Amino acid sequence: SIAFSPDGNTIASRGSYNVILWDADTRTIKNTHIGPRDGIYGSSSVAFSPDGNTIASGSWDFRIRLWDVDTGTLKNTLTGGAAPVYSVAFSPDGNTLATGDVEGTVRLWDVDTGTLKNTLTGHTGPVSSVAFIPDGKTLATGGWDSTIRLWDVATGTLKSTLTGHTGSVRSVAFSPDGNTIASSSVDTTIRLWDVDTGTLKNTTITEHTDEVRSVAFSPDGNTIASGSGDHTIRLWDADTGTLKNTLTGHTDSVLSVAFSPDGNTLASSSSDGTVLLWDIAPAEPPRLAADVNADGTVNIQDLVQVAANFGATGENPADVNGDGQVNIQDLVAVAAAFGETAAAPAVYAAAAENLTTTEVKQWLHAAQQANLTDPDFQRGVEVLKHLLTRLTPKETVLLPNYPNPFNPETWIPYQLAEPAEVTIRIYAVDGSLVRVLSLGHQATGSYQSRTRAAHWDGRNNQGEPVASGVYFYTLSTGSTRDSVTAGDFTATRKMLIRK
């Protein structure tokens, strides 16, 4: 068998007649080799204690040995069985060690004292695997009698027997949430069981072509690894049972598999005498140059960041094309990376939040002056045109304030179909003027977010808080054209202060 230490720094594997400790980073054998070396009492199973200070090893000499991980010295020997020990596992709290032997007996030992706490009988053949549920209350055992048995750890009573395999069960493992048991068998299948009901889930994995010697759940519970006599390791989706990957490299049966605590490495041991480490960390997707703010999406924020860096030289994320200067070519490259998403409502909403038509018009003018014929550049220009269209309201409108009712402040949104001098006047119900908000010259566009809408703090022109009640707000625009009357607009809405 093979096991990672809880900190992931050390790997323990079963040697011919000893336990070998490996440095997980350097992939070298540590100076600590522990276990009998007389060619008779080979180790059959190894497990780390939850605190990482102790290794338990089962042996063909009927003994279980507890070793100090740092020094390799023997801490205790547990005796009392009359058969070779096939499997060992520590409880999550580290206080109990479970062992399964060739005669079908499961024993629970007190780790501190080395005394036998309980003996569990029921299997009619060797117990090849033992595993504790994450909360430590249930023990699962897999046997050559083709069954998985669930035991109450506190009382030692049998809770349920899971049947379905047609050959010896070689390995059992609990999912990290404790809801599922995975079992593997000489019958070449992997089966998933519901812990609460003891029933077989709909997922039975049958793709291996030889006995499945070992199964393990990834720390996040999303993946099951299996090692088989067909010389392969396979990774499966824990929910659907679909094959995610096949790892090849061993030249004989894969005896054991184990995930590192961070889930990025899988260790495997084989009858070919090797231990292999597999990098199974998901590959990071390549970063798009147009994703200037590195948030994983090319969007309006990237355009804004490029525009904010116009003229900058040297190394800069906003220098999308890498020519040493942030300019209109970089901005158009970002726009080109939008693709079809430029028409999406979310993109338009973000544009309205962050951009003005004046800015986009300036960008378009600069891009058209560059007059580049590159297809990607032209696609970026088309995206900018589309954004300008979406940012240009078809009509000037005064929109409902928000929140409403309010206390003490509110925002007054509006949109302008053309540039204008904008003023908002607030009146009491008797028609008296309460407050004037002179917003000045505003470009064509939408002014709806809190950063762009008009803001009223609930005070009059003298700075005094106004009383509760109904008020009216009027938007007036004065054209910026030569003709004073062209484009003038007035609209009024009602709002309520409630204190």
Image: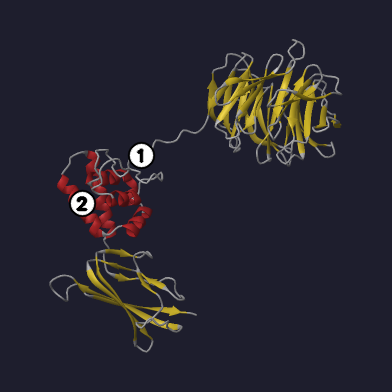
Sequence-wise, the earlier of marks 1 and 2 is 1
Q: Secondary structure at mark 1?
A: loop
Disc 1: which residue: 288
Q: Do labels 1 and 2 touch, CB within 8 Å?
A: no
Callout 1 amino acid: Leu
Quarter of the figure with the N terminus = top right
User: Residue, x 20% and y 55% (percent of image)?
Assistant: 362
Disc 2: which residue: 364
Tell me the CA gap for discs 1 and 2: 23 Å
Q: Where 365 falls versus 467 (above or below)?
A: above
**Which residue is outermost to the bottom?**
430
User: Residue, x 21% and y 56% (percent of image)?
Assistant: 361
- Asked where in the image residue 353 lies, by quadrant, the reply is bottom left
- In this orientation, which residue lies closer to the viewer: 369 or 394? 369
- Asked where in the image residue 34 lies, by quadrant, the reply is top right
Count of all numbered marks drawn on residues in the image: 2
- In this orientation, which residue lies closer to the viewer: 457 or 416? 457
Q: Would residue 55 be found to the left or right of residue 336 on screen?
A: right
- Asked where in the image residue 113 lies, by quadrant, the reply is top right
Callout 2 amino acid: Leu
User: Residue, x 77% and y 11% (percent of image)?
Assistant: 40
Q: How is the structure coloured here?
A: secondary structure
- In this orientation, which residue lies closer to the viewer: 379 or 314? 314
**Which residue is outermost to the front?**
71
